[in-house]
Amino acid sequence: MPEVITVKETSPPRPGRKQGNVFDTQGRRWGVAEEKRSSYVPGCTYSLDRVSSFTPKGSDQVFLTIEAATLVNGIGQATQAYVPAETRAGPAPAVAAPLAPYVSKDEQIFVCGLLNNLAGNPTVSWLAMSTQDQIQLVEQLRYVWQVTFGGKPRQQTKPQSFNEDVGDAIPF
């Protein structure tokens, strides 16, 4: 029966090494290839399908490396399997949905950061807003990004009371 672990934390490889580490809630350290390390999320439970071990000459210490694991939810049913790239058939599955071609990563981070702040603000009732109002707010935040950081020139708009004959905004 495969071993089941709950991930406490992960760490990147030391300089010159190819393996990072996964630490479980039992205090054990497991080696893992750097490209696989991001697959292990703290707080999630994994069934270790394939583990290799290595004992250096003249040492009693055994180093364990996770070769393949399956993400398991809280009731013990597999929800996602990680298969090493060298054993996969066909192209690798997409990890995230691709961005629309007109959205830069920086713009997305800017807008998401402001939305997070707004959602956490007790004076803003984000959930009480209609979907249309939420969409309009996101579009406004995107416009702020484009004008300030995105290189889009600001569109000059005339005040509503602009008097074309005189060339000013004074209504009399």
Image (cartoon, helix red, strand yellow):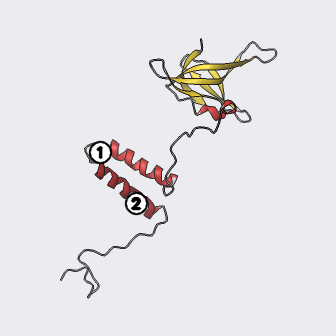
Residue placed at 28% from the left, 46% from the top? Answer: 124
Total numbered circles: 2
Disc with the residue nearer the chain's start (2 vs 1):
1
Give the position of the C terminus as an image quadrant: bottom left
Query: Circle 2 sits on which residue?
Result: 144
Q: Label 2 amino acid? A: Val
Considering every residue shown, the one lying at the far left of the view is 172
As displayed, is residue 78 above or below residue 12?
Answer: above
Residue 115 falls left or right of residue 172:
right
Q: Do the residues labelled 2 and 1 touch (CB within 8 Å)?
A: no
Q: Distance between the residues labelled 2 and 1?
A: 19 Å
Query: Circle 1 sits on which residue?
Result: 126
Residue 150 rendering spot, x and y as whole percentages: 48, 62
Q: Label 1 amino acid? A: Trp
**Residue 96 in view (yes/no):** yes
Q: What element carries label 1?
A: loop
Residue placed at 66% from the left, 19% from the top? Answer: 51
Of residues 79 and 11, the one nearer the viewer is 79
